[in-house]
Image (cartoon, rainbow, N blue to C red):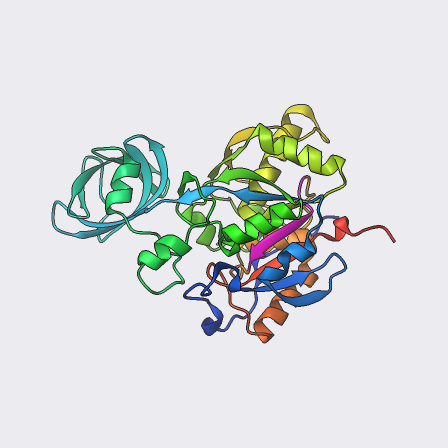
């Protein structure tokens, strides 16, 4: 019988001072906690990661690029508004979170950044449908601010514009960084390539919903926020090649996991259980909890995640609830740095352990 989980199964106590407010001086300067396939813990540095990988392995990165999605402004009546673009839906259209003392209605103009007016067209659930007077990306790049996570207390500055972005980011559309990738610099990528470790890319535009708490007790009642993803044919081919040579598929970040596993689920939905991975794109609401059968990945590079979050549930599904609880208790005791600007984990699935 499948056990039903509650949100309290994924809670832990985190001293606030362990929430990293700034990144390490160097991208690779973070610590790395390895949770191996046998469940043992190893305190390492992120620079040790290449030594944990095998020449036949494949690293899969999320190449989404964080857009300057945060805008301040005011309504025609003078009231202040805060806009966080969640998703660009057309050249001049976007869905956005809008904070205001009074909910703006259809037809209302919002003066943003003292530079241009956006018009409220209507609502889509909790989001507002806005029309911009020029291409959204251009206006955000010129007038927006980097949308740091809610637990980072300082306003974004030029340093954040560089460090809250992976060095391989190329597809604009995310409002939160795929933070496991923040630890990689160009030298590390070159070192990995020199060791014969292949790489491939997916795109998943991370939404602000990644920071939303699970608001129901029974996880079966939770509805995931939607995020747009793409798994290209080149990545499908790279995964097949890695499998053929006996290598592991190592996802860099939970967003890469969700893209890959969403594509696998879509293939099975179309062609039946066990269908091979195929190129795919679209919205995903995939919610991975313990008991989930991973179809694609064998290991994961990731940061530490918020208590009671869907991402903590995802890693618990990969390694097991108790091993993750032990790992997080160890990380707190050893004063690891948590969340987006914090330290990293390397998690190896028990299913990937070599046969005795």
Query: Is 72 in the magenta?
Result: no
Q: Is residue 321 visible?
A: yes
Helix, strand or loop for the magenta stretch, by majority: strand
* Rendered position, 273 above or below 164: above
Q: Quadrant of the C terminus?
A: bottom right
User: Looking at this view, is 243 or 51 the one in front?
Assistant: 51
Image position, residue 317 (x, y; %): 66, 51
Image position, residue 333 (x, y; %): 59, 75
* Rendered position, 62 above or below 244: below
* Outermost residue to the right: 356
Dividing the picture into quadrants, the one containing residue 123 is top left
The magenta stretch is: 296-303
* Rendered position, 72 above or below 344: above
User: Which residue is depicted at the point 49% across and 40% down?
Assistant: 204
Query: Is 298 in the magenta?
Result: yes
Give the left or right position of residue 58, taking residue 351 as reference.
left
User: Looking at this view, is 309 or 280 the one in front?
Assistant: 280
Give the left or right position of residue 96, taking residue 248 as reference.
left
Image position, residue 312 (x, y; %): 57, 56
Q: Is residue 109 visible?
A: no
* Rendered position, 277 above or below 85: above
User: Looking at this view, is 170 or 186 the one in front?
Assistant: 186
* Outermost residue to the left: 77
Image position, residue 198 (x, y; %): 63, 41
User: Which residue is depicted at the point 46% across and 48% down?
Assistant: 167
Give the left or right position of residue 228, taking residue 200 as reference.
left
User: Which residue is depicted at the point 58% across and 61% down?
Assistant: 46
* Outermost residue to the top: 271
């Amino acid at each position: 019988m499948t056990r039903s989980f509650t949100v309290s199964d994924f809670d832990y106590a985190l001293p606030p001072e362990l929430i990293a407010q700034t990144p390490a001086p160097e991208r690779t300067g973070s610590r790395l906690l390895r949770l191996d396939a046998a469940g043992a813990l190893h305190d390492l540095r992120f620079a040790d990661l290449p030594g944990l990988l095998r020449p036949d392995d494949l690293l899969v990165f999320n190449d989404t690029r964080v857009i300057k999605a945060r805008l301040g402004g005011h309504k025609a009546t003078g009231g202040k508004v805060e806009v966080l673009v969640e998703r660009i839906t057309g050249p001049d259209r976007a869905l956005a979170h809008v904070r205001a003392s009074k909910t703006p209605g259809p037809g209302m103009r919002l003066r943003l950044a003292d530079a241009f007016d956006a018009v409220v067209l209507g609502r889509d659930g909790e989001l507002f449908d806005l029309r911009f007077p020029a291409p959204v990306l251009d206006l955000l790049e010129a007038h927006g601010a980097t949308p740091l996570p809610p637990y980072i207390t300082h306003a974004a500055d030029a340093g954040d514009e560089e460090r809250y972005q992976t060095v391989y980011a190329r597809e604009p559309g995310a409002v939160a960084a795929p933070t496991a990738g923040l630890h990689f610099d160009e030298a590390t990528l070159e070192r990995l390539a020199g060791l014969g470790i292949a790489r491939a890319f997916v795109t998943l535009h991370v939404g602000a919903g990644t920071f939303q708490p699970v608001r129901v007790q029974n996880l079966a009642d939770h509805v995931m926020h939607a995020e747009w993803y793409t798994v290209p044919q080149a990545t499908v081919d790279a995964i097949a090649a890695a499998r053929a040579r006996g290598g592991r598929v190592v996802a860099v970040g939970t967003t890469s996991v969700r893209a890959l596993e969403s594509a696998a689920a879509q293939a099975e939905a179309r062609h039946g259980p066990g269908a091979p991975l195929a190129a795919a794109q679209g919205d995903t609401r995939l919610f991975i909890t313990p008991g989930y059968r991973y179809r694609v990945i064998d290991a994961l590079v990731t940061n530490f995640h918020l208590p009671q979050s869907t991402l903590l549930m995802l890693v618990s599904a990969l390694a097991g609830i108790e091993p993750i609880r032990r790992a997080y208790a160890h990380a707190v005791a050893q004063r690891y740095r948590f969340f987006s600007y914090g330290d990293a984990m390397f998690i190896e699935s028990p299913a990937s352990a070599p046969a005795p």
